Image (cartoon, coloured by chain):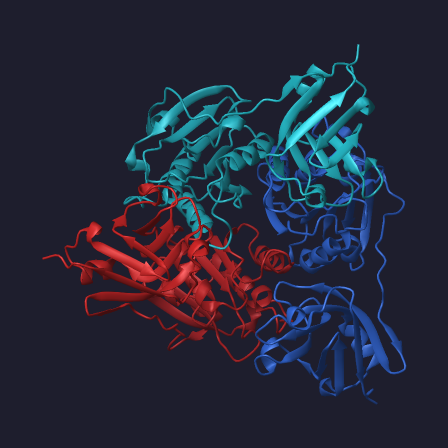
Chain colours: A cyan, B blue, C red
Amino acid sequence: MVRIITVTTDFGQKDSYVGALKGALLSVNPNAVIVDICNDISPGAIQEAAFILSGAYASFPPGSIHLGVVDPGVGSGRRAIIVETAKHTFVGPDNGLFSFALSRESIVKRVNITKSGYFNNPVSPTFHGRDIFAPVAGHLSLGVEAEAFGTVADSIVTLPVSLPLFKGGELSGTVIHIDGFGNIITSIKEPDMLLYFPGAQASQLTVETGSVKVKGLSATYSDTKEGSGVALIGSSGYLEVALNGGSCAASFNVKVGEKVRVTGERGE
Amino acid sequence: MVRIITVTTDFGQKDSYVGALKGALLSVNPNAVIVDICNDISPGAIQEAAFILSGAYASFPPGSIHLGVVDPGVGSGRRAIIVETAKHTFVGPDNGLFSFALSRESIVKRVNITKSGYFNNPVSPTFHGRDIFAPVAGHLSLGVEAEAFGTVADSIVTLPVSLPLFKGGELSGTVIHIDGFGNIITSIKEPDMLLYFPGAQASQLTVETGSVKVKGLSATYSDTKEGSGVALIGSSGYLEVALNGGSCAASFNVKVGEKVRVTGERGE
Amino acid sequence: MVRIITVTTDFGQKDSYVGALKGALLSVNPNAVIVDICNDISPGAIQEAAFILSGAYASFPPGSIHLGVVDPGVGSGRRAIIVETAKHTFVGPDNGLFSFALSRESIVKRVNITKSGYFNNPVSPTFHGRDIFAPVAGHLSLGVEAEAFGTVADSIVTLPVSLPLFKGGELSGTVIHIDGFGNIITSIKEPDMLLYFPGAQASQLTVETGSVKVKGLSATYSDTKEGSGVALIGSSGYLEVALNGGSCAASFNVKVGEKVRVTGERGE
């Protein structure tokens, strides 16, 4: 059986760390199929990693293992976990890294990784990715049950999520990510729009963030003329503000954390 | 049978997009072997992507599938295509992305991708890479015939190519790419040199672009002393201007689009 | 038998070069498992590549082939080599690229690659990665013996290593790498510390480089309060100076080559 293992880290691509982690994984299971989700997470940025992971994991086939190592607390008291859901398995530090993905899945098992027999010993206190998480993912991919790696975890760390707020006819949220195209991704999701502006025509809504103001929702980036702003529901279900043919974030100097407002007529 | 699928996109490596595309592909064919050509194409730069693809695809074994997604018109009217040549299959938007590669191959089939039964439904209007092209490439890699995905395409989009010009004893072209070493790659190819300067000694030719002027053609970068300019036919068959031990483009501030001139004595 | 082939180059990720190299490899052995160690080595930086390779290769399973192409002398007189050790095989230019890794291994065979029957002919004088090293690695992965590729090499190029110096109670070395987290990695290794400060308590040692001064050795990055400097033995066995929650190198403007001093009481 082929087992796919995805990798998400803040190791960057200029060092030996991603290679060492993959080598450790392949040393346990030389037949594992390893696929990078992202190794360029900003150093220690757990929330960013949680967002990136949540945008990719669900595209992988059921049975995939998602190894995430953004781990500023490596070697400290933070726990190491395996979380199994109906379709996917997550392995990494218990720091919230998987919480956005897990909020959409039904959790089947949570295990504290403690059985050092599965580790690369001696374990470096600064590189659990290579010495704990990669070998554990390797053994999971060979069919070892999650329970074998430790004891059941009563709870796991969950990152706070700031839900959009509806008040005075205005739906407000924040910018949660700027992608490589300069598209501005907000905390407002499609169901929020449907809930608070039920039956509204897409053309009746206005989206604002920083100095960008877009009237009407479009289906795709090229629905307006080149150089114009466009608001749409992106491929992960979040409200986005973009610029046809350019970087919206750069052009309007919008950054993560900026407020976003949606206004419009409520349908009947 | 192993089917290799190469990936060329402008998705960058800081987002979930490349991972999501690969996950969608592996969800169709978990045994596909995926190899990145480049995911750092400048956003929307079709011509750049066409050049990069044309420099790598031919090294892959016959039967390889080349998935290209640089797609500024995603969700608009632009068509989606499969092009099969004697040795390779190309899948992506019909925007010219494959035209440099195709100019060297004999086309066997051209198909408009229309059969939505092969897509990830519902298709996001902003992410055909994940929802159309990756699953189609996955099904192709499983042996589904190109014809199954739609109807025959009468024509496909081809990017204009500016051919070098020979006038008054001077061959002129343009800079088409600056590589990561700072080597300046020009639109002039080896056969152009042989055609316009037949029988010329390599030492008799002079190549100029911006403020760089190199007398004589070399075989390799280290044929001159360190810090000196060198002109040579590069590994993809284009005339290059480089600096032994440094970035020629940065040192002389040469950019894509700059004019290039070759002069010399014509052999007899 | 699965054969893993790692790839370490200075080709960058914006060009077709890494893709072309992998295509050439897969054209020889479509079943090879290719894993990137790093393709973002600074252009021509042999010493940097040797350090990165030495940090990752040993994590890969015995039998792995390590293809390294940082090759500023491509096409010149420099030799091409295969070096086999008890566990690993290295393929690339004979310029010292493998010497840090090899210093830890017992060499079994050294072969000058000369048999052009294994190459992609005609060989581009500027791209031996694609035309010589990748096909040779491919054939090695198919089980061809190293001897088949040429003649025994009497010696290979080894990079000079500046060993730490102990004088007047002070151990001095240099900064050899700054990693993506801004951690400062020094030429001083754990055994040097044990040799020159035998029996010393970790708390009795002081590490200085540039304007950073850290008292005491820690086990991991988060052992001090956020924003504080920390010195520790890193995951590859080198003494590191880091900042909990930030880039030490950027904060203190420390660069590769900077002096490092360790002082302390010698234990009894």
> Along the horizontal axis of the image, is C24 left or right of B150?
left
- In-front residue for pair B169/A95: A95
> Along the horizontal axis of the image, is C30 left or right of B124?
left
**Could one spot residue C221 in this view of the protein?**
yes
The answer to whether A141 is drawn above or below residue B217 in the figure is above
The answer to whether A48 is drawn above or below residue B100 in the figure is above
Give percent across and percent down for residue C51: 41, 62
- In-front residue for pair B247/B30: B247
Residue at the spot 65% in from the left edge and 34% down from the top edge:
A185
Give percent across and percent down for residue B90: 74, 47
The answer to whether A198 is drawn above or below residue C261 in the figure is above
The answer to whether C66 is drawn above or below residue B213 in the figure is above
Residue at the spot 63% in from the left edge and 45% down from the top edge:
B3
On-image quarter of the C terminus of chain C: bottom left
Residue at the spot 82% in from the left edge and 24% down from the top edge:
A203
List the single residue furthest toward the top.
A268
List the single residue furthest toward the left.
C268
- In-front residue for pair A109/A75: A75
Q: How many marks?
A: 0
**Could one spot residue B125 in this view of the protein?**
no
Give percent across and percent down for residue A200: 79, 17
Give percent across and percent down for residue C193: 23, 59
